[in-house]
Amino acid sequence: MIVASATTLDCPPERAWQEVQTSRLLTYITSPLVRFVPVEPPALPAVWSEERYLVQMRLFGLLPFGSQWIVITKPVIDATPGRQRYELRDKGHGELIAMWDHRIILRETDDGRTHYTDRVEVKAGLLTPFIWAYASLFYRYRQHRWRRLVGSGFAYEG
């Protein structure tokens, strides 16, 4: 099942791209719904590389929700002014979720802002409808946190 959610961020796409590539952003936009506890390697990188990262997931920071591989690639990068487009992909999988194929797509708007899309394909056997429903809410929440972060001038403290 596929979840897709989009929003406009009031910042240039190159700035959004800088932030998307950081684990700090992931921690901020998913808090407090999900906390990712690094297993392998024992710490998340400051900037995502095209690598694999094993994490334990905790709902609301406390409830164990299985382990998950975050598998990062950056398949599309076009920094040409006027038609910027960036993509970060996590082709993740784990104990409860057989496939979590998440694409973050950043595209420059006509007025120089960022059209931001989360698109995730989920396969989790019998749990798929429930995981899909959760993902639908989760990505709307993440985008709310994104807009709040941009509106604060990228002040991560709040």
Image (tube, rainbow, N blue to C red):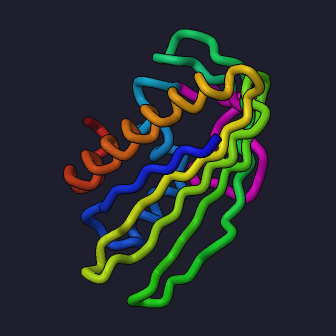
Q: Which residues are magenta?
A: 35-55
- Image coordinates of residue 103 in percent, x first then y, are 60, 55
Q: Is residue 158 left or right of residue 115?
A: left
Residue at 51 percent across and 83 percent down: it is: 79
Vertically, is 140 above or below 56? Answer: below
Foreground of the two, 7 or 130:
130
Q: How many marks overall?
A: 0
Q: Nearer the viewer, residue 136 or 40?
A: 136
Residue situated furthest top in the rendering: 63
Q: Is residue 42 magenta?
A: yes
Q: Is residue 72 visible?
A: yes
Identity of the residue furthest to the bottom in this view: 81
User: Is residue 47 a member of the stretch shown in magenta?
Assistant: yes
Residue sitting at x 28%, y 50%: 147
Front in this rendered view, residue 144 or 3: 3
Q: Is residue 52 left or right of residue 34?
A: right
The quarter of the picture where the N terminus appears is top right
In the picture, the quarter occupied by the C terminus is: top left
Q: Which residue is at a point 59% across and 22% down the rendered structure image?
A: 130
Could you say where residue 109 lies in the image, as x and y percent from the top left? 34, 77
Does residue 40 appear in this view?
A: no
Residue 88's place in the image compared with 101, above or below, is below
- The residue shown at (50%, 42%) is 26
Where residue 56 appears, x then y in whole percent? 68, 23
Q: Is residue 69 left or right of residue 106?
A: right
